[in-house]
Amino acid sequence: MGKSVYIAEKPSVAREFAKALGISGKQTDGYIENDKGIVTWCVGHLVTMSYPEVYDPALKRWSFSTLPFLPKEWKYEVIDNVKKQFGIVKKILNRSDVDTIYVCTDSGREGEYIYRLVEQMAGVKGKNRKRVWIDSQTEEEILKGIKTAKDLSEYDHLSDAAYLRAKEDYLMGINFSRVLTLRYGNHISNYLRNDKSVLSVGRVMTCVLGMVVRREREIRSFVETSFYRVIAGVKCSDSFGFDAEWRVNNKSKYFESPYLYKENGFKKEEHAKELIRLLKQAGNEMTVESVEKKVEKKNPPLLYNLAELQNECSKLFKISPDETLKIVQELYEKKAVTYPRTDARVLSSAVAKEIDKNLNGLLHFNYVADFCKEILENGSYKEIAKTRYVNDKQITDHYAIIPTGQGFNQLKNMSPLHIKVYEVIARRFVAIFYPPARYQKLGLKLTMPVRSEKSDGQNFEETFFASFKVKIDDGYLKVSKYSFIKNKNDGQEKLQDQFKKNTSDNEKPNSGNSINEAGINDKMLDEESINILKKIKKNDKLICSELNIKEGKTSPPKRYNSGSIILAMESAGQLIEDEELRAQMKGSGIGTSATRAEILKKLFHIKYLSLNKTTQIITPTQYGEFVFEVVDVSITHLLNPELTASWEKGLTYVADGKITSDEYMEKLEGFVSRRTIAVMNSDKHVELKRRFDEVAKNYVKSK
């Protein structure tokens, strides 16, 4: 019987496999071996796609005559600085005493691609190949993954998608970068008076550039609009009163009036003053038309996928998505958390059955130990499989990022920031075992009469709304108090209760019909005030002690930050805050959880985008906007998030076996060929000069 070889993606992972398998022989150069087997490793990618000049030396020179470049037989080569390790791996995989290869690279499309390229270049034949697919690097998970490893051929569709993704990026990058540089590179250089500009264009990268530029232009073109609300001060007793907001209704003097801004404001202050004058003429008595009481529940949020975690860490720690990925990857390699490059926000039913192991492990993490003890004692974890936090249909490759309950010896030696990120993941995980937070909501609808000043003597009825919200049960919120936010005023309340949307002067007026939506009394009430409110009933008379005008202003769209841009990429360019709606768009995002951070990093590096490291706010550069304009007049499809997402969805169809590689490749080559030829035959220099002039106005340096 021959030996088995286990090939991992990097040395640190290989060591964990060797430890779990008991392969503790002498670590030679590039592998570990004893009588039980061999463990070897890649160091990330060992093989890459060859540049065009490898196909033909004439292709090294950029020229229209060599475009479009569409290879019929693809060439690959070993990366120069890892040739030694490739040679070691090649020799091991082809050894005559090796009969089984366990592929232990990362469980995902990119990990699959890394191994398949190695196997292709090494010329491996006649071996039994098994795919190890795991969600964490604990010893139990590794051994289970090896035991349940499937034949590598079952992942051929995933491999096809991986190859196609690389070919797609290659063809678009090579052809579009060359043709746009040849046609318009000098135009940019002459305008900016610098050396020749080489335009770097890519399927995902250019789309992200477009998202940021368009958002910046929305902000520039935004015109602030003032609106005026009428607020009544309502007196309930000598010690307590509250505010109520006027809102138009079908009995109002202003029903369907052109003077209105939305449903609870006026475009001009004079009309708000007119309303106040008419109300004062009618007296100060208000009638309670209705009282609405209800208990509102807020469930714990779904678990973290990589995009959500990157967004959260951007808010909490002002770090980039790339930094977050690096940290969570290191936590994964130290066995502390599960696989990070995941799009799922739920658990699998198989994991749910053994989730008590994770909770027991977390008893050693002081920040959540008491909560885990309570969960284990009351048995709430036993019902988790019946909740929205477990759903096999919402998982493709990996479930959500959660703590493994292991790795604490290594965790305590990591940086404070690593421990904070771990705490964020742990608290989100523990929270799902707690009940919803509960709020008592009280809504009041108050009316005041208004008489027409015309001779018709018509009577109107103006309506005011007030709402109150009191927390009656913390539920999961007691788990979410981060240890690193000491002062309540530093944002803990905001973090705890992010779903609570209060109305502010800078927000659009509320247009809802529920009397619980006015949202202007969302402040903590004492017990006496609560008791007074509880006694109010329909037809009660209250006193309007004052009427005031509150000016509000519309706000421009917010710039993307390093976290929100990741969420926008995930949802195909639509910055959707609602987590359920984002989940519905799964599978049609821009890029993947594994690539988004690196794409942003490249855009900063080539100076298309600028990142404020203090605030993590992203803005375009002048050069980036010029590239945007060139693409917009030439291959505008690349700036379309939905189209870019559709390419990614096509890769998913290939991975799922719904379409073939040939079908996908035919469409890809057709798209690249048509767009490249169109640019070659175009002349947009005059149009671009006009656009560059407009862009340049926003980058005039002050003297």
Image (cartoon, helix red, strand yellow):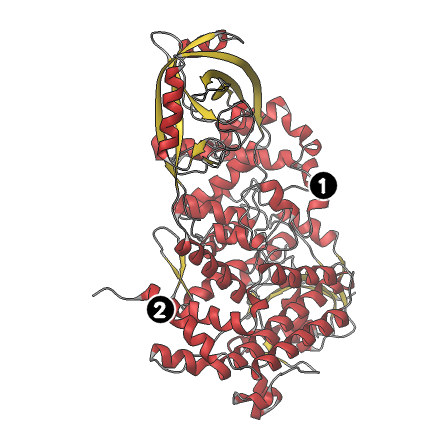
Secondary element under disc 1, as helix, strand or loop, is: helix
SS type, badge 2: helix
Q: Which residue is mark 2?
A: 696
Q: Is residue 444 above or below residue 587?
A: above
Look at 39% across and 68% down and name the residue there. Answer: 694
| Image x and y of residue 197, in percent | 42, 79
Depth check, front residue: 639 or 12:
639
Q: Position of residue 180 (x, y in %)?
A: 51, 79
Task: Give how far across and how far down residue 74 sits, in percent.
Answer: 67, 80
Q: How far is the residue under mark 2 from the one under mark 1?
A: 57 Å
Q: Residues within 10 Å of mark 1 (few under 14, many from 20)?
A: few
Residue at far left of view: 703
Residue 623: x and y in percent read 40, 70
Q: Horizontally, is 387 left or right of 475 in the view?
A: right
111 and 147: which is toward the camera:
111
Q: Which mark is residue 129?
A: none
The front one of 568 and 183 is: 183
Q: Nearer the viewer, mark 2 or mark 1?
A: 2
Residue occupying the point 73% across, 71% down: 97
Residue under label 1: 350
Residue type of the residue flagged with mark 2: Ala
- Determine if residue 80 is in view: yes
Q: Is residue 606 at least partly visible in the picture?
A: no
Residue 143 located left or right of residue 606? right
